[in-house]
Image (spheres, coloured by chain):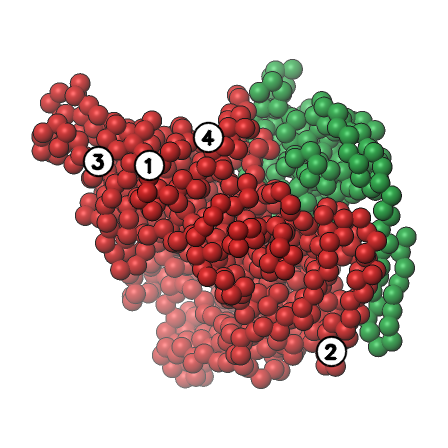
Chain colours: A red, B green
Amino acid sequence: MTVFSSVPAHIERWLEESSAVSRRAFLKGSGFLVVTLGAAAAAGPFAVETAAQAAGPYPDPDFHQLDSWIVIHENNTATFYVGKTDCGQGTGTAFRQMMADELDIAYDKTTCVMGSTDVTVDQGGSGGSDAIQVDGWPMRRTAAEARRVLVEMAAAKFGVPVDQLAVRDAVVSLKADPTKRITYGELIGGKRFNVTLAGNNIDATTGTAKVKPVQDLAIVGQSPQRYDIPAKVDGTLTWAVDVKVPGMVHARNVKPPTAGARLVSVDESSVRGIPGFVRVVSKGNYVAVVCEREEQAIAAAKQLKVTWQKPATVPFPTSDDLFAFMRSATPTSRQNPAVKGDPDAAFARAAKVVEADYDMPFQGHTAFAPAHAMADPSNGQMTIYSNDMKSYGMRNGIAQFLDMPRDRVRVVWMEGPQGYGRTAADDAGFEAAFLAKEIGRPVRVQWMRNEETGWDTKGPAFAFRMRGGLDAQGNLVALDYDARAADYCHVGYNEPETVLIAQLMGRRRSTPAAGSAGLPSEMYEIANRRMASQVVGLPLVWETPLRTGNLRDPNGPQITFAAESFIDEMAAAAHADPVEFRLRMLSAATTDDSGFRRARSIAVVKAAAETFGWDRRPSPRPIGSGDVLTGRGIAYAFRNQTVVAEIAEVEVNRRTGRVWVKRIVCAHDCGLVINPEALRRTIEGGLLHSVSRALHEEVRFDGEKTTGVDWISHPTLRHADTPARIDVVLVNGDPNPKRPDLPHYGAGETSCKPMIAAVANAIFDATGVRLHRVPFRDARVLAALKAAHA
Amino acid sequence: MRRAASLKGCATVDVAVYDSRMSTITLTVNGRAHTVDVEPSTPLLYILRNDLGLHGPRFGCGLGQCGACAVIINGVAVRSCVTPCSTVRSEVTTLEGLAKGGTLHPVQRAWIEEQVPACGFCQNGQIMTATALLARNPNPTDAQIREGMNNTLCRCMTYYRVQAAIKRAAVDMGRTA
């Protein structure tokens, strides 16, 4: 096998420097696309303009122009330009599959360019697991439209009606005489389509061509290897952290040592002697040091003498006191309870009533690489090289933040550490742009580990109160759900009034965002229910390391932990098998089966149980006598139109408290699957992320700062925790497997949802001890086992 | 050198004093010698990335805890973020140096076959640590893989596929040995 980056460096540089400029000229209709990137993965997806930026402005590519989406090259290859970003799930590969299928071109004759605001349409970047479900549709329709236009061009050329033509692998030929043929490249290579599309918004973008029926899709449903992986394995990928331009300097932040601290003074003389020192920049409580070299900036940020004044009031309780605080706090907002039936009467009649509280701490993104960006202010413009998953929003936010015209600002999206919501509120991009404007030179910013773990956006802590009532037959006839989330002042997407640098500078929204708690997402038929939720705030609202933001499947793992743990508690109270107990409630449902939600729920629960080899019995199992106890637990959930059921098998060491999730089964139905192998890996990642959240992750804090600042003080899942076996079952619709009437739904986040509950339920099955507080670290498990058997 | 600065009523700020004496350092990396003029305690990582233009090793924690910056020196996967450049005496191999004569290392091939990376940012550490592990133990057991890789972190949680790829690479390397 050869090394994949086959383009010599000087050629690559030339391609990089010329491609974005010519792309803009192409989109303006002022010329041919002079640069053809050649077959497949030459430089296309990884191209970056590394020279000082060319003159702007940077207008928005018009999504109503077919040329904004697809370019056919003279060598009969195609490049797709889409407004998404790939957070490591292989969505770029999936987009190529979907568009190549509609265009009728071989997958390996295509490339995909994503997420750079001046050369790709604004589809919002990533978020909500909707890339395939929502954004894939305009991609498919524009590709189908391009095919239609090309076939009509061929028809005119040959002087025959289009129905006498066949298309295969970007070649149009006469059905009657296949020797008469013309390629897409010969028809239009390097030239504009000049076709205007319809649609009131970008998601509705369409031509007149229809997309193919599922039965005619040939590339969708296969598993081509992800195009981005070879360069990540051989070291040739240029990541956002790698971008360098002439004259670039390095910056590091100096964060307040305690939450809410006020800057009193900065002594610049304390670092002036450091070689390469450029400047200290401070505004409000934001402080950064800029040096010529990276290690100099790191040293200067450590050495800078800064005087801070602690706030007069305590910013937040300690993490040990958090849940007592949350339960006694006055909510900042309440959702009207969703009520079905008559819960009070049902509880009064119930044969058995069970109550339980559940606690879920703040959990961080703790991205593998700290926040980073490089901003180039040359030519009176601003280019930000960033891994921001929502690059388009970052461009708008930074233009507002710096008070620059939008068309003078662009964001070049490049690969980075996993997004999962952290880079939707991307602090480093704003900081780099601010510093670049102040210094007048390109500035690269990177946070240090303690900043990222300590100060990134957090998934909100939740305190739940649950109550359930069983009738004499052991049916769940009444359910009370009450959720309380510490989510007041939830930060938005790249907002110039909520990113951290804006907060520290005192530039804030007048009204903090209300935040949200949320309700369980399942299809259970429970005759009498009340579901209520509230949001509470901590004393320090702004400039806090406990600022909340979207964390992968926002609120889903928290809510499903409580909801599906409690369903298990009710099954145990009813002496019912946990699978059978759930199927009973799913089978009893009679309403809201849009999208076959009920039938699909039953199918995934059954598929998970069958794959696992589930033996039907109530939990807990008879408790064993050895040091290591084993058990299994199930949990299930919906997210949007995607449904999952997950079973965890655990070993619990009763001497040490250590929990090992030994085996996982996940049955998953996201409708039409684009790339099964990439999907399996995405699901596995989601499962294990939630295992990490179940076993390890918690944001710890004393009364003034977060105390988890690295991988020792804030642990995450490790190799030793990895399950011995993971089975992913792609159910894809019930009652008929592979039913073609289900469209492609989203799959990035659903598998995160039920896993924490599945682990808790398995621990209960093994030990008879119910854990109500995440994470299930050794000491907490050991204490719970000892308390139960005292 | 460290000293503490404090002011009445304010938080104490711990201050490290930067040693600014520059030295000429010669490093052999991926078969080529390079000379740089830097402060001797500068971590190897920044020289590899910023002076030699190598992007395989990356900054993850700066504390030697995660493995993002791993390089191979004397057959051992070393954390370049906490390795002062002046202490490096032997040849350094980075991710870019694993392939020989345009052919990927069997570990890299296994990584592609298993489609291991998600975002991929940690995979330098996974690949370099696995390569060093297999060099000293060509047939590791599952337990030895877990132990040998345990301090190499991944936040996309690709561990399951990393372990599968290590086993695949072990088989491939055994076949060609």
Please state which amino acid type lies under the numbered disc 4: Ala
Q: For the residues carrying marks 1 and 4, which lies nearer the camera in this image? A: 1
Q: Secondary structure at mark 3?
A: helix
- The residue indicated by pointer 3 is A150
Q: Residues within 10 Å of mark 3 (few under 14, many from 20)?
A: many
- The residue located at (81%, 56%) in the rendering is A272
- The residue indicated by pointer 4 is A42
C-alpha span from label 3 to label 1: 18 Å
- The residue indicated by pointer 2 is A311
Q: Earlier in the sequence, mark 1 or mark 2?
A: 1
Of the numbered discs in the image, which one, if any, rests on residue A32?
1
Q: Earlier in the sequence, mark 2 or mark 3?
A: 3
C-alpha span from label 4 to label 3: 25 Å
Instruction: Provide the chain ID for the residue under circle 1.
Output: A
Instruction: Provide the chain ID for the residue under circle 2.
Output: A
- The residue located at (43%, 52%) in the rendering is A58
Q: For the residues carrying marks 3 and 1, which lies nearer the camera in this image? A: 1
Question: Are dots 2 and 3 in contact, CB under 8 Å?
Answer: no
Q: Secondary structure at mark 2?
A: loop
Question: Are dots 4 and 3 in contact, CB under 8 Å?
Answer: no
Q: Residues within 10 Å of mark 2 (few under 14, many from 20)?
A: some
Q: Secondary structure at mark 1?
A: loop
Where does residue A376 sit, x and y in percent of width and height? 57, 50
Question: Are dots 1 and 2 in contact, CB under 8 Å?
Answer: no
